[in-house]
Amino acid sequence: MTQVETHTEDALEVLLSAELEPIVDMVLRRHDDGLYEALSHDGRVSFRRTGPGPDGYETVVVTGSNPFSDTSTDRFSPLADERAHPHPARTENSYPFAYDHTAQLFDAPAAPDLCVLHSAAHNWQDQGGHLGEHGSLGIVQARAPWVIAGKGVRSDGVAPKSARLVDVAPTVAALLGCRPIGEHERGEMFLAGQDGEVRHDLLDVSRGRPRMIVGFLFDGTNPNVLYDMAARGEAPNVARLIEMGTAFGHGAMAGLPTVTLANHTSIITSRLPGHHGILNNAWYDRRRGEQVITNSSATWPTAMQYVAPGVESIHDALHRSFPGEFSASVNEPCDIGADYSTFDFFRRGEVPPIPSSPSGLPHTTERFVRPSKDYSWSSIVDHMGTEQAVGVLSGSYRDQTYPLPRFMFVNFTLTDSAMHEGGPYSEMAAASVRDSDARLGAVLAAVERTGAFDDSAFFLVADHGMEENNPSCSGDWDVNLREAGLRFRDEAYSFLYLDEE
């Protein structure tokens, strides 16, 4: 056994100990012989890839209880069922697409030696004390909303079915009428290396395709909470989209890790994180001896420098099929191929005017902007994004004229900040949904003013879910690993690189 293998076994002994069972859900790794393994405190499963796609895996050995014994996508839905099962134990949880989402992570050259997944109950007090968390494979943390509506889309309301976030881009490209670039085992390919598939069950283009598609992202939004608020009239613009189209009642599943920029990029490119190169919010690149941080206000403008060669976006698919058409990316770090991008201003050193305070801004809940720094800042950012989207749709922003976009994507951040801080069921979370819904409504109104509303389609997604944790279940596995004498880097509090300072 090599030194690295010895240290891996030493780390697993610590991580899978009874002492850490309350906070460690499971540990994932890849063996040199091509096998993958998921290990928990009471069992493990090894498996191998036998073909492409989420179903191309076979189990090799199960010892004890298989950590991936339940991969169903309908667990803990709707909201009442989710709230009746707070922070479920592993034996009660579900892990959709767990085999594929594990393997894809280790396809990346910068993948960690071990990926540690925290339990549903774990409160990262040492990492900020949030009451809402995500990042793991468990269904509540992986499940994001996906609503699609308008011209060319079926009107099925909230339907009892599920999807993956990597399905968004090819479905949007197909709805736009882009030309496929080939075929794979799940149908047409619209983007190079796409992992997703076109969800034809959403589409009905018998009366024509939309002239424009506008997409929205409510970062970190729990879909059960969102759908419930829409049904009760607290998110009327989201409710309008659901009434016009179809919502995935069981959600669209994020790839591993279920974190922000990894899955923003998956939504736009149809590649899982291990395939597009934005592995996490932070990771370590051994080849360069460099820590990479992508998900911060300082790094968002340049984050896409780390995408793998050949990665394409919805913007690229649009331009390949419709040369000369205009696309816009508003407040979205994954702006590959977009004609207009918020972060182009930053890269050129032309930072748009930033309000000094959210006080007096429309669609802003004053009750939370005063005590919460994150709520305040996200309200400012989302207000600026709304101004940009409305301006571009109106034909002019900051003294620059723009044509009507064929595709626009608008990212809102407030919901993530609020659901982290207050938890997904809090009044702060509800306020963030109401504020974001109103901003979405302002963009819809701008589309109506163009006269193109009836000739447009819309979609709303999130990058991951949000799960309420247990504040009494805290702790840091790094402490135990260091006490055992192990050297390692723990990036984004989940990626372990052994024998690294």
Image: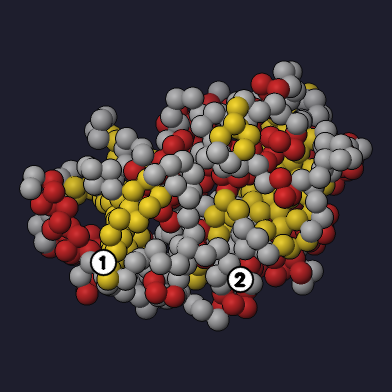
Residue, far right: 451
| Mark before the other along the chain sequence, 2 or 1 | 1
Q: Is residue 332 visible?
A: no
Residue 15 lies in quadrant = bottom left
Q: Is residue 163 above or below residue 429?
A: above
According to the image, label 2 marks what residue? 77
The residue depicted at 75 percent of the width and 34 percent of the height is 176
Left or right, residue 311 beside residue 392: left
Left or right, residue 265 beside residue 35: right
Q: How many marks?
A: 2
- Horizontal and vertical percent for residue 248? 67, 58
Disc 1 crowd rating (10 Å Cα; few below 14, some 14-19, many 20+) is: few
**Towards the viewer: 31 or 314:** 31
The residue depicted at 52 percent of the width and 40 percent of the height is 195
Q: CA distance from mark 2 to mark 1?
A: 30 Å
Residue flagged by tag 2: what amino acid is it? Ser
- Horizontal and vertical percent for residue 109? 32, 35
Q: Quadrant of the C terminus?
A: top left
Residue 107 lies in quadrant = top left
- Horizontal and vertical percent for residue 132? 49, 66
Residue flagged by tag 1: what amino acid is it? Thr
Left or right, residue 343 beside residue 150: left
- Mark carried by residue 212: none
**Towards the viewer: 395 or 325:** 325
**Towards the viewer: 401 or 20:** 20
Left or right, residue 160 beside residue 392: left
According to the image, label 1 marks what residue? 63
Asked if the residue at tag 1 contacts the one at tag 2, i.e. Cβ–Cβ closer than 8 Å, the answer is no
Which element carries disc 1, helix, strand or loop? Answer: strand
Disc 2 crowd rating (10 Å Cα; few below 14, some 14-19, many 20+) is: some
